[in-house]
Image (cartoon, coloured by chain):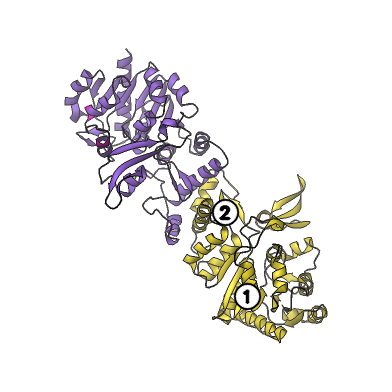
Chain colours: A yellow, B purple
Amino acid sequence: MRIVVLAGGIGGARFLRGLMSAVPEADITVIGNTGDDIHLFGLKVCPDLDTVMYTLGGGIHEEQGWGRADESFAVKEELAAYGVGPEWFGLGDRDFATHIVRTQMMSAGYPLSAVTEALCARWQPGVRLLPMTDDRVETHVLIDDPDEGRKAVHFQEYWVRLRASVPAHAVVPVGADQAKPAPGVLEAIAEADVVLFPPSNPVVSIGTILAVPGVREAIADAGVPVVGLSPIVGDAPVRGMADKVLAAVGVESTAAAVAQHYGSGLLDGWLVDLVDAGAVDEVEAAGIRCKAVPLMMTDAEATARMAAEALALAEEVRA
Amino acid sequence: MRIVVLAGGIGGARFLRGLMSAVPEADITVIGNTGDDIHLFGLKVCPDLDTVMYTLGGGIHEEQGWGRADESFAVKEELAAYGVGPEWFGLGDRDFATHIVRTQMMSAGYPLSAVTEALCARWQPGVRLLPMTDDRVETHVLIDDPDEGRKAVHFQEYWVRLRASVPAHAVVPVGADQAKPAPGVLEAIAEADVVLFPPSNPVVSIGTILAVPGVREAIADAGVPVVGLSPIVGDAPVRGMADKVLAAVGVESTAAAVAQHYGSGLLDGWLVDLVDAGAVDEVEAAGIRCKAVPLMMTDAEATARMAAEALALAEEVRA
């Protein structure tokens, strides 16, 4: 079975681990969000790709969900001693090495997709990890700054520094309209037996991937089941601050509203949590097959069951 | 008193510490060798400038003489895990931060001299540290490779990887002939009351600085005493492998031969160690005032005495 998964960071990575446990023989291609990539200290940092790579490769800081296990922070301390910031982005020493290798390869002319493949040669994530694009896309968030008025900040500044504590007026994947899908992305979608949307952020993760011209169309036209899992449980995001960016795109923070945001033209099936069983009818009325199942990724087994439910719903849709 | 010191790495840095202790009120400008600079992992590394900066700024690994105290090696371990080398160059985590800041600033368009000034804003070395040039100069060493025949390798590869274990047929400061002295270099020399050559490597450290067009001439024309300290004691280098590169330029590894290599057109005074007292007459016959004093930088006091002797010889020459 060939599965294509659109993934953001922590939620996507943990879901993938469950999926691989549910269907160990599956051929999985992950299309990773690069809209939250950022240049820090002259280095190219790809938080979502790295979270997937570290999580599936056994290098992740498990409790934190991002960054490396057994991490130290000598480089960051020294940069601060030089007065070089930002200090709000927590890069550890081991993590720095990844960004140094990536930046060196990119400076030598390799596209991000080739660099990602090279990094994965070490981590052996067990999936094919593709960036959504080799082109530069940067998600910006429009906020009201107390001093400077309305202005756009990098997504990481909004998310990490400001902790999404101020209203987001708009979320703009800058550069996405000019981006081309990375080599292999459209081919993987065209050859997929099923496409899954993990409980990743529907705006700044999956939404950004879908904003790359050709990706949404390829998924809609693939003629295979497209099934998603709600990142909203009981009207609040399971983790992260998805509600803040959903508001920016005018979508309610409910499992049903997110399904309708994707729309029946794209989505064939939608899993909501048991607490949102009341939303099933509304989603189905919108033309999307819906089922309520436990959606908390509390441990590996629960996550594997979620993945199995998503695949079962895909088969239901297909039949 | 305005003193200009031409400095390589460890020897130059330790001498400077002695000099500052001997004449705390002096206004010292250090012209640092950049011929052993190297790009590693996409980062610009300046071993000699950093050794001076860390030594005078209190960050040096004292026993080792280069690199940072309390150093860790997580980044290097990770790079090795990615299969990215070279592994023979020992960059620690704290040291990496310096190279990251430097590379980021240079990518933003700042010349090395401005970057060095910015780094020194943290370290407060107590001297004005100038790179010899803002242009790229790379010292290459011509060796016989068992497989590839005669070829040029970067000085660091010769020195660190090969530990100068093979004969050096030539030492070439590539790019030096096109380099311009960094801002402030010629001015500092013109305004100096005395110019000192510490017991640094006469070929790959001081020789490289002198190879930047205009520097040798400025020193010779400054009309102030130019005094050097022999890096050779008892026919062997005090530290390092100066004899190997001296052979490449056809100079004997003796205190007298090094003085004559600099020449009376440049050098006014020369200190040799007590064990080389027999060389004093030969050096003086070559037109260079010479004195035998203890030249082992065994501790801070001994080093300060050496610096004081050099300044005393300068006054003798001046009178």
Have a look at marks 2 and 1 and say if they share a chain: yes
Q: In the rendered image, which residue does mark 2 sit on? A: A44
- Residue A233 is situated, as x and y percent measured from the top left of the image, at 73, 74
Numbered marks: total: 2
Vertically, is A149 above or below A232?
above
Q: Where is residue B113 in the image (x, y as percent from the top left)?
A: 50, 34
User: Residue B155 shows which numbered tag?
Assistant: none
What amino acid type is highlighted by mark number 2? Lys
Vertical position of residue A114 compared to residue B6: above or below: below
Does B249 lie within the magenta span? Answer: yes
Residue type at the position of mark 1: Glu
- Which residue is located at x 47 percent, y 22 percent? B187
Where does the magenta region start and end?
B247-256
The answer to whether one can see residue A231 in this image is no
**Label 1 crowd (10 A; few <14 / some 14-19 / many >=20):** few
| Cα gap from disc 2 to disc 1, whole angstroms | 31 Å
Q: Is residue A8 left or right of residue B21?
A: right
Q: Is residue A239 visible?
A: yes
Residue A237 position, x and y percent, is: 71, 69
Residue A191, disc: 1
